Image (tube, helix red, strand yellow):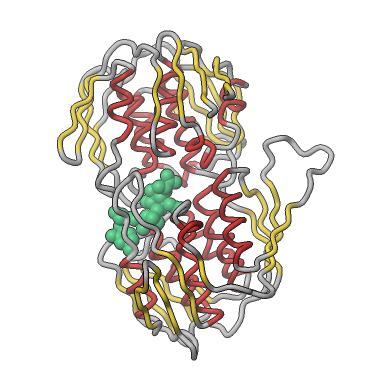
Amino acid sequence: MDRIRIVGGNALNGAIPISGAKNAALPLMIVGLLTDELLILENVPRLADVAQLQHILGNHGVDITMSGKRPGDSAYQGQTLHISAKRIVDTTAPYELVSKMRASFWVIAPLVARMGEARVSMPGGCAIGTRPVDLLITALEALGAEIEIDGGYVVARAPKGLRGGTIAFPKVTVSGTHVALMAASLAKGTTVIENAAREPEIVDVAECLGKMGARITGAGTSRIVIEGVPRLSGARHSVLPDRIETGTYAMAVAMTGGDVTLQGARPELLQSALDMVAQAGATVTPTNEGIRITRNGAGLSAVNVSTAPFPGFPTDLQAQLMALMTCARGTSRITETIFENRFMHVQELARLGARIHLEGDTATIEGIDRLKGAPVMATDLRASVSLVIAALAAEGETTVNRIYHLDRGFERLEDKLSACGAQIERVSG
Ligand code: EPZ
């Protein structure tokens, strides 16, 4: 199994191109199921999760081709996917596929909206908590789908089509909002989503649906209104830049010191995270090219933060901020409010010498002068990358094992960091 070997201590200097957002690319690919015409997605990151979803959609009969690279394209340019769901051959998403990637459960919405039926395996547990799908099911029921649980599968039926309705989410849910948007776009009549997620990836999906002929207003606010249409057409859409990748590299530069421009990054997608990076002691400057992060000399300051839905501090950057705080002056507190078990990185950061005390949903971090390299591993994507950030500043060598988690969500991580002066390499076998 591949590992990543890092020798810490080098400052990062240079430029890092930011890839398209994984968490927008995945629902956008699923949107392709809503139309029998061609959906062209540009700036899709080259990630294991994207390849896996390609495989899952293939099982429903979706034909996905990739444009080849043109002369002059850089290695970092995202890929262009041509998605054609002209003929859906199977409305079942089996356990073997759905259990590999939770987001694939979302195919239930376009399948029942377009085909009148879907049989999708429940995703099951995952490393960051129980992550149920009850809110997705109630959203579909509010649009008239009949739901039955049968042998571990959610069976959704709407033989006469879905109809508009009111969906009032009791808590903010990204997955619930994606599913509601997709289903309501093809429902008869008007749907109102109350307490909708406001994440930029929701806005990106709504924009793409709009290009396909959906009538959506209010995406990016907590009240979204959708006037259903009988059919959607093809479209061309470019995936927005990855705010979590942006925040991760911003924290890496804050950790090691240096001067890096995050090319193509958009500050408004992660203002709360950039505020934390600035509070911790780095300088954050929006530029024409993206976002420039610098930290020279001065030590890091401790910060306190709770994760929250957008525009709050994202749970997907909680582990990375914790890595940064391991070397801050003083005591910081980080509270995780979105997922109940998202602290797998704590034990592994402790292997590098970090002093972290965990109580309930809050981690208290006593900053130390320097971490020391060690072999580590993590069972989740963001936890794994937090270990990379810590290792970049640690004394000596760190080996990060089980890096297939990193490959799920970070495109060419080691290339991007080594181009900025990090001593990082992938070791095969
Ligand atoms: C999305 O997950 C992201 N995944 C996650 O990123 C991200 O951490 C999360 O949103 C929060 O921002 C993708 O976009 C593919 P939710 P999602 O529905 O949609 C509870 C990463 O590392 N809930 O907003 O599954 C749920 O358990 C990943 O890239 C219910 O109770 O998150 C959680 O506590 C990890 N019932 C809260 O809501 C439901 O039916 C928010 O979940 C659905 C969710």
Outermost residue toward the bottom in this view: 160
Establish if 248 lies above or below 218. Answer: above
Left or right: 45 with respect to 283? right
Outermost residue toward the top in this view: 396
Front-most of residues 41 and 13: 41
Establish if 256 lies above or below 175. Answer: above
Percent x, y of residue 229: 55, 83
Front-most of residues 309 and 116: 116
Outermost residue toward the front in this view: 151
- Count of numbered circles in the view: 0
Residue 152's image quarter? bottom left
Percent x, y of residue 80: 70, 52
Tell me what residue is drawn at x 40 percent, y 58 percent. Answer: 123
Left or right: 210 with respect to 256? right
Q: Would residue 310 be visible to someone looking at this image?
A: no
Q: For the C terminus, give its image quadrant.
A: top right
Of the four image quadrants, the one with ligand 1 is bottom left
Front-most of residues 201 and 319: 319
Establish if 90 lies above or below 265. Answer: below
Tell me what residue is drawn at x 24 percent, y 35 percent. Answer: 334
Q: Would residue 407 be visible to someone looking at this image?
A: yes
Percent x, y of residue 67: 77, 51
